[in-house]
Amino acid sequence: MPSLSVFGAQWGDEGKGKLIDLLAQDADYVVRYQGGANAGHTVVVGGQKYVLHLVPSGILHPAKVNVIGNGVAVDPIKLLEEIEGLRARGIVVDGKNLRLSAGAHVIFEHHRLIDQCAERWRGEGRIGTTGRGIGPCYADKAARTGLRVCDLLDPSTRRARLRAALAEKNELLLQVHKEKALDLEGQLDQYTALAERLRPLVGDTGKEVRAAYRAGKRILFEGAQGALLDIDAGTYPFVTSSNTGPDGIAAGASFPPRQLDQILGIAKAYCTRVGGGPFPTELDWEKEGTPGWHMSTVGAEKGVTTGRCGWFDAVAVRYALDIAGADGWIVTNLDVLTGFPEIRAAVRYRVAGGETRDWPAEASSVERVEPVLTSRPGWTEDITGVRRYEDLPAAARAYVEWLEMEVGTPIRMLSVGPDRSQVIARGLKPW
Ligand code: GDP
């Protein structure tokens, strides 16, 4: 099984970074295929914490090839900052272990400015964008006015396309957003210098990955954000600008879909949500002493995410795994639930006209559902040191098996703490 897709099956921040870092031990290639530097994967190795934004998590292992595919929106400033940050901590990053697709779209300063200005106009309808220019970059890709890495590296294409882009964007900045215009020559100088620093990493990464697969190398596709933030399958418009699950791999990594051998979703044992938008099982997470506050505090959700927490939502995860065609899933943050007298989860939704196990097609309907919660007894034992499934408290096992039954897809691994070593295998297929 030489290719594996690992993706978030909730609203992001499921702990993908940690699991991908772990699974990367067996991979030869780790490939990002969508999103931008808005995703922050946190990986803890031997007590050292690394936050990765654009660079795939395999960078922390020597001898892995890390690929930023053509579907990623690349901010050269952020990418170079991240590379320098890793190098400063003694990690080797060069054109051998980090590859950047010549076809990836570039985020420019005008994208960041427009992203931040546009959010101001949305008022109540704010979608909680990170303001890093990713949405406007993808919008320009679809409008065919963007620049790819290969365009940035070619002097005449770079000048012609950036001139045309700024002619329009400067009008938008000046007339609509009442901001200052950007100077073409200044932008060309800045981005040319950045592009030259990236040049050693650039290549036809789709071809490289396809050839590696044919040669029997193991390829791990690393999803960012989560299925419910997918631009097509998620709670539109409160979504990210790309296809986050295995649906994004074919286009974003130029990899044939029929060569995807195994698909695994990742979900927390409860639920969190990044940004605005519907969240059926959301709890009050600000009031001290409440279950939501406990998740938010013990799970250290504030800061990493916006802090919004709630009970596990089996309807949402069932849907996310179904559209992905997942072979299995991994539950993270089980340790955060230790100490709860009872643990609840949504198994169905109450909607106008009855109850359903199905995810509603539109975000506006998701806003109107009422979760039907069922509960199981909790446990008090510290589980962060447990490494074998049978050593978990009986109540923890009962909770895990209940989630598995409700979701209807096998749970292949459990995570009981942030460190790479804090996992419990549960029949993960070799790949
Ligand atoms: P990602 O974007 O899906 O990679 O998720 P993040 O890395 O942003 O957020 C997950 C957070 O949870 C990070 O701070 C991780 O170190 C931490 N984490 C991951 N797995 C576990 C776990 O099983 N238990 C606990 N307590 N924390 C975890």
Image: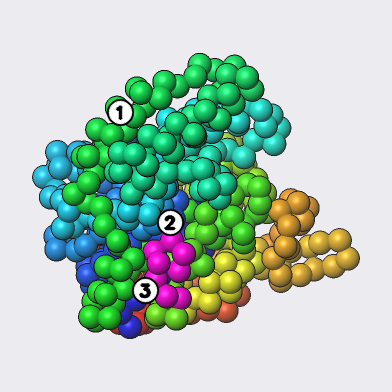
Q: Which residue is the site of mark 2?
A: 71
Q: Is mark 3 within 8 Å of ligand 1?
A: no
**Looking at this view, is 298 or 276 the one in front?**
276
x, y (%) of residue 338? 44, 57
Q: Where residue 9 appears, x then y in whole percent? A: 51, 63
- Which residue is the site of mark 3? 4
At label 3, the amino acid type is Leu
Q: Earlier in the sequence, mark 3 or mark 2?
A: 3
Relative to 227, is 4 on the left or the right? left
* Relative horizontal placement of residue 8, taking residue 196 as reference (left or right): right
Q: Magenta residues: mostly which secondary structure?
A: helix
- Circle 1: element type: helix
Q: Amino acid at mark 2?
A: Gly
Q: Which residue is mark 1?
A: 190
The vertical placement of 363 against 399, above or below, is above
**Residue 248 pos. (x, y %):** 48, 63
Residue 394 on image: x %, y %? 45, 74
